[in-house]
Image (cartoon, rainbow, N blue to C red):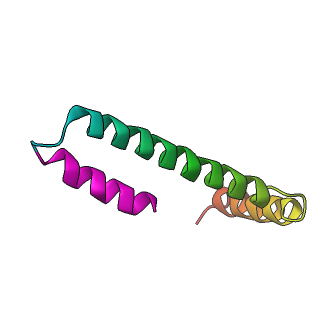
Amino acid sequence: MARNDAAYALTMVERAEVPPEDLRALVRKLAGAVADVSRVAELRGERLCEPVYGPAVRVLEEALRESFRRPL
């Protein structure tokens, strides 16, 4: 839905006959869509940090760090 709103907004901005009130309403709608997308991204990020994944991520991170310390 956010992608469609963004495409529609870009189309409307290019049309000189679109009243400023309509453009302001569009900006409000896009701002709401950005806020929604941001909330979803934050929630997904929080799920990735759950303790179930934590130990495995730490082990992988340490292995990568160690591999970079070794000379080639």
Query: Taking 24 as reference, is 20 left or right?
Result: left
Would you identify the image quadrant in which residue 69 lies?
A: bottom right
31 magenta-colored: no
Number of numbered callouts drawn: 0
Q: Quadrant of the C terminus?
A: bottom right
Between 26 and 33, the one lying in front of the other is: 26
Decide if residue 47 is on the left or right side of residue 14.
right
Q: Which residues are magenta?
A: 1-15
Q: Is residue 3 magenta?
A: yes
Front-most of residues 47 and 3: 3
Say which residue appears at 33% left-offset and 34% top-offset.
24
Corner quadrant of residue 71? bottom right
Taking 19 as reference, is 2 left or right? right
The outermost residue toward the left is: 16
Vertical comparison of 1 with 9: above or below: below
Asked whether 17 or 43 is in front, the reply is: 17
Which percent across, then down, holds residue 44?
70, 58
Magenta span dominant secondary structure: helix
Residue located 85% across and 59% down the image:
54
Q: Choose between 56 and 3: the one closer to the eye.
A: 3
Q: Position of residue 21 (x, y in %)?
A: 28, 33
> Residue 52's image quarter?
bottom right
